[in-house]
Amino acid sequence: MAARAMWKGVIALGSTKVGVKLYSAVQDRDIHFKLLERNKHAPVEQRMVKPDSDEEVPYEEVRKGFLSDGNYVMLDKEELTKLAPKASREIEVARFVTTDHLGPEWFVRPYYLGPDSDVESYFALQEALADSGREGIVHWVMRNTEYSGVLRAVGDHLMLITLRHKDEVVSTKDVRMPNGREHSAKEAQMAEQLVVAFEDEFDPSIYKNEHRERVIELVDAKSRGKRVRLKKVQEKKAEPSLADALSRSLLSVHKKGVSHTKSQASTEPAKAKKAGSRTRKSSTRKERSVA
Amino acid sequence: MPRIARKKKSTRHQDEPTQSDSALPKSHWSGTLSFGLVTIPVELYSATRSSRRSLRMLAPDGSPLARRYYSGEGKALENDDLTRGFELDDGSFVVVDDDELERLLPDQSRDIDLTRFVPRTSIPPLYFDKAYILAPAESTHSAYRLLASTMERLDKAGIATFVMRDRQYLVAITSRDGLLRAETLRFADELRTPESLGLPPEKKPSAERVRHMKAAIKHLSKEQAAEKELTDTYWQRLEKLVEKKKRDNEGVVPARVEDAHDENVAEVIDLMAVLRQSLANQKTPKADKASQPGIKKTRPAHAEKTRARR
């Protein structure tokens, strides 16, 4: 069954319009806890107070203060409402730039776009955009908020990723890494060999959020009244000089002849990766027991 | 998940930044990048900051507000009175405290183990979550520079998992302009797919319609930096309103001294200051020799933990 779109809009490339539906590409998998009173295990209430007197200020009376030159300029809800952008369905393309123009530090949240009614125009735009090697910088208003984003062809579909504003991204333009000793050709070569030895395809399915899974196990075990034993673990050892470490790394990689982690190579068969059953290093942990 | 704030009224003043602290940005994490047997101590800094940082919640009289928790009976609660609970269908709670959650974290904690390098551009953009900059944490940058230049030359990203504060992250380590970066990635099960959303599969459009779209794209194609399009127009309108109110002296109240201090410190990340700081120890050639690249410095095992809990 098709998911429900969270918003409908119209991409405007000048006078060319393409109707789209917007779907969140992210689904929340976190386990959400409520804050409880420790003794009674009862949910707590959150209130806004003046910190010095603990005097409560009801939500309706809370103002926003803009810090400026050592003063707060107070803004009430009415003033802020007036600043809200005009509602619109239009996703306006400001320009198309080459993809990879903006680094991932600009990305906030991805959305899939699906066709609204004109399916052919949607896929025509998808195809044209994929062929162009470009992405659109777009602006739109959704739920009273202005967004900037990139419009991209991803797979067979279109995607919109919201972007940060200019003053939210730390510029590294003027950062110059300090000079130091030049690397020897041998070091550079060994480092390259090591990267190449560890080369692989990007396969996100092999990574699991183990912590999240263990939290679910813990909650599950506790809800069935089980006692849970938990232990904490140790650190790794250091190694001497750079060249020495590089050559020994290479040696150990070549011996094993596979591009896998040290722990993996020694504890897991290579095909475990394909089965998608790999959880990093978990097999080497003996001390921990949940449930 | 939000941590229970540990700050207590009585310790407030101890938590305020001192002059020397405020000169350098806070690092979110410090640990080591492991590359084969080479270990590179790094500090992780946010590559982004909130543009809404100067907006605060105030009482009608202009005093800044704080969040406080109360019991159902209206009793004010201190942090020690709080714990967490997962609500079951019947309305009861499974109680889990922060220490338990922390003990469930994987043991690779202080390391980012680089054992898988993928073509940088092969990571689909929807995976990228938060962006950080990795600064070398030692006086000798040799191993750091070697890894950065090698990865940049080969255009590779190292994929790994690591633990920061109370969470486990999937991360892509990338290199740009000699600087290593860490981009946290969403886990695959946190992403939907066109199939799971029920988007229609591709339907071949007519050549003419595609040609029309190509012409429209070409018409709007520009080579200038996209950043120009990324000004915060809402914020500009807000600033205009604030300026007007200041001129009219309407709703202007003095901020407390420590708040005004925050305004000046802001969250501007001066990377040059970070790098200078890490170089400061490297004075004599002798000192350089003593701290061989790749040697992992002994680090108090629980230093990070203490910091995260504050």
Image (cartoon, coloured by chain):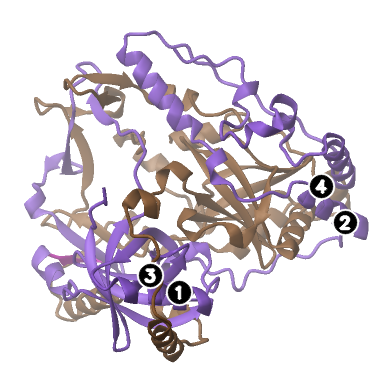
Q: Amino acid at mark 2?
A: Gln
Q: Which residue is mark 2?
A: A189
Sequence-earlier tag: 2 or 1: 1
Within-10-Å neighbours for mark 1: few <14, some 14–19, many 20+: many
Q: Which residues are magenta?
A: A71-76
| Left or right relative to A57: residue B38 | right
Above or below, comparing residue A255 to residue A18 in the picture: above
Query: How many angstroms separate mark 2 from mark 1 (CA)?
Result: 41 Å
- Earlier in the chain: of badge 3 and badge 1, it is 1
Q: Residue at x 28, y 24 (%)?
A: B85
> Residue placed at 41% from the left, 44% from the top?
B190
Along the viewing direction, whichever of A162 and A114 lies nearer the viewer: A114
Above or below, comparing residue A146 to residue B26 in the picture: below
Q: Chain of mark 3?
A: A
Q: Are marks 2 and 4 on the same chain?
A: no
Marks 3/2 in contact by CB < 8 Å: the verdict is no
- Residue ID at (23%, 73%): B238
Same-subunit check for callouts 2 and 1: yes
Three-letter residue code for mark 4: Pro
Give me the chain letter of mark 2.
Answer: A
Residue at numbered disc 4: B293
What label sits on residue A127 in the rendered view? 1
Q: With respect to residue A152, does A206 lie above or below?
A: above
Which marked residue is nearer to the observer: mark 2 or mark 4? 2
Do callouts 3 and 2 point to residues on the same chain? yes
Residue A67 sits inside the magenta stretch: no
**Alpha-carbon span between mark 1 and mark 4:** 50 Å
Colour chosen for chain B: brown
CB atoms of marks 2 and 1 within 8 Å: no
| Residue that appears at 59% across and 62% down | B271
Tell me if residue B144 can be seen.
yes
